[in-house]
Image: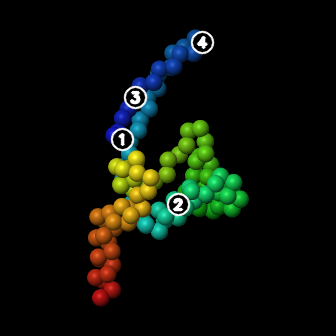
């Protein structure tokens, strides 16, 4: 999955429309607890998600677009991005380099 830009051409009854579709993955920083919380939210059935009133703006956005024809994609870890064919990347996600560094710094500051 690399950044891409595609030119789309659609013809109507009288006109031809040209549009561009841009896909650009980006890096986003997220806490492990928030990532787990959002993954648990996505794993719920649509009925269960709608049954609970949500105030979190990210969950509301997901709730609205997740089950649509053109869904919104949830944030992914670097390993989920690179190893998209794996069924579960939880062990890999918990052992990413930045996470290890932050855990070491947290343990050092406690001693």
Q: Residue at x 62, y 49 (%)?
A: 64
Most foreground residue, 44 or 7: 44
Q: Residue at x 28, y 70 (%)?
A: 101
Most foreground residue, 45 or 23: 45
Tag shown at residue 38? 2
Q: Residue at x 67, y 58 (%)?
A: 48
Most foreground residue, 26 or 32: 32
Q: Mark 1 — residue?
A: 1
Horizontal and vertical percent position of residue 11: 53, 16
The mark that comes first in sequence, 4 or 1, is: 1
The mark that comes first in sequence, 4 or 2, is: 4
Q: Mark 4 — residue?
A: 13
Asked whether the beta carbons under mark 2 and mark 1 sit within 8 Å of each other, the answer is: no
Q: Is residue 28 visible?
A: no
Q: Residue at x 61, y 52 (%)?
A: 63
Q: Residue furthest top?
A: 14
Tag shown at residue 45? none
The mark that comes first in sequence, 2 or 3, is: 3
Q: Is residue 10 visible?
A: yes
């Amino acid at each position: 999955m690399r950044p891409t830009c595609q030119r789309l051409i659609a013809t109507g009854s009288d006109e031809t429309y040209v549009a561009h579709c841009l896909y650009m993955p980006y890096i986003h920083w997220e806490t492990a607890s928030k990532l787990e919380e959002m993954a648990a939210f996505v794993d719920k059935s649509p009925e269960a998600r709608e049954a609970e009133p949500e105030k979190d703006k990210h969950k509301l956005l997901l709730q609205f677009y997740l089950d649509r024809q053109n869904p919104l994609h949830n944030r992914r870890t670097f390993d989920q991005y690179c190893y998209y064919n794996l069924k579960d990347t939880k062990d890999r996600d918990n052992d990413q380099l930045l996470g290890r560094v932050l855990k070491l710094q947290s343990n050092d500051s406690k001693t």
